Image (cartoon, grey):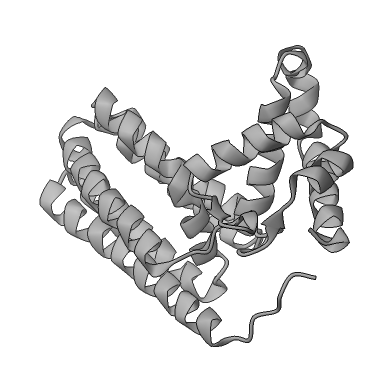
């Protein structure tokens, strides 16, 4: 792997530490016992999800180990964990590299999410409490505020929080678990969509429509609204993928 890649990972590790400084202070005792592979995994995952490590970039064990000051074992274990999440692919005679965002991968994830979210909102319309409706209202307002920051990560976090309220309001523990598992794979696509500032207005409108459906407890209309919400996301990201295919690719040095 090139020195540029190693430097990028090292700087990501340092940035991750500084960005999470408050968290590290409050969780200091717990982190003393956090397995090293998880520290490496969280660092590399953060870098991939935020786009600091680009699709197609290689992950060379020895260079990562040297830069992060660890042995190759936690690096290897972290790469396996990233592969299980679909963030890394193993290429014959080339090794590990950051997975590309593909049309099939996008459709596979969003097809499942569309079905689960539609079920979530139908159940939420039946079971949501008045306090949860107020919480959802606050989440919609927070999302609007976050779009003004133009910080894609903070906007994505606000979007996740909003959708999590709906899923929790379904009252179905197994459904909540399934959505939670899918959320990890979904985050990368969500972030790509949110990076497109031109989509923020439509996102806000769609959230408002979803909120109105839930407030009026109209599960059928809510399911339609959330399916369209996800469909629009899919179409936007597909357009981005097609545009990137037309761009000249720069090889790793």
* Observer-nearest of 210 and 215: 210
* Observer-nearest of 48 and 192: 48
Residue depicted at x 81% and y 31%: 71
Left or right: 112, with 98 as reference point: left
Residue depicted at x 45% and y 47%: 185
* Observer-nearest of 136 and 166: 166
Residue at far left of view: 220
Left or right: 220, with 131 as reference point: left
Residue 80 percent across, percent down from the top left: 57, 38
Residue depicted at x 41% and y 74%: 238
Residue depicted at x 64% and y 59%: 94
Q: Quadrant of the N terminus?
A: bottom right
Q: Quadrant of the C terminus?
A: bottom right
Residue 201 percent across, percent down from the top left: 46, 70
Left or right: 222, with 6 as reference point: left
Residue at far front of view: 93
The image quarter in which residue 2 lies = bottom right
Residue 10 percent across, percent down from the top left: 84, 47
* Residue 164 appears in the picture as rendered: yes
* Residue 134 appears in the picture as rendered: no
Left or right: 3, with 23 as reference point: right
Is 89 drawn above or below residue 57 in the view shown? above
Residue 187 percent across, percent down from the top left: 49, 50
Is 207 drawn above or below residue 174 in the view shown? below
């Amino acid at each position: 792997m090139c020195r540029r890649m190693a430097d990028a990972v090292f700087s990501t590790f340092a940035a991750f530490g500084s960005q999470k400084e408050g968290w590290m202070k409050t969780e200091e005792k717990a982190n003393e016992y956090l397995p090293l592979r998880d520290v490496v995994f969280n660092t590399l995952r953060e870098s991939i999800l935020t786009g600091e490590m680009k699709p197609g970039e290689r992950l060379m064990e020895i260079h990562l180990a040297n830069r992060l000051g660890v042995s190759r074992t936690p690096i290897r274990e972290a790469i396996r964990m990233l592969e299980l999440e679909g963030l890394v692919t193993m290429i014959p005679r080339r090794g590990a590299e950051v997975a590309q965002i593909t049309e099939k991968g996008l459709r596979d994830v969003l097809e499942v999410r569309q079905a689960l979210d539609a079920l979530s909102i139908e159940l939420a319309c039946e079971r949501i409490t008045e306090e949860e409706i107020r919480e959802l209202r606050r989440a919609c307002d927070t999302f609007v505020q976050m779009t003004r920051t133009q910080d894609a990560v903070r906007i994505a976090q606000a979007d996740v929080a909003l959708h999590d309220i709906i899923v929790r309001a379904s009252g179905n523990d197994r459904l909540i678990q399934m959505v939670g598992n899918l959320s990890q794979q979904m985050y990368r696509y969500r972030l790509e969509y949110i990076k497109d500032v031109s989509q923020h207005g439509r996102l806000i409108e769609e959230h408002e429509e979803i909120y109105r459906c839930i407030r009026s407890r109209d599960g059928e209309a809510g399911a339609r609204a959330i399916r369209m919400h996800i469909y629009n996301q899919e179409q936007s990201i597909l357009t981005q993928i097609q545009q990137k295919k037309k761009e000249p690719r720069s090889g790793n040095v």
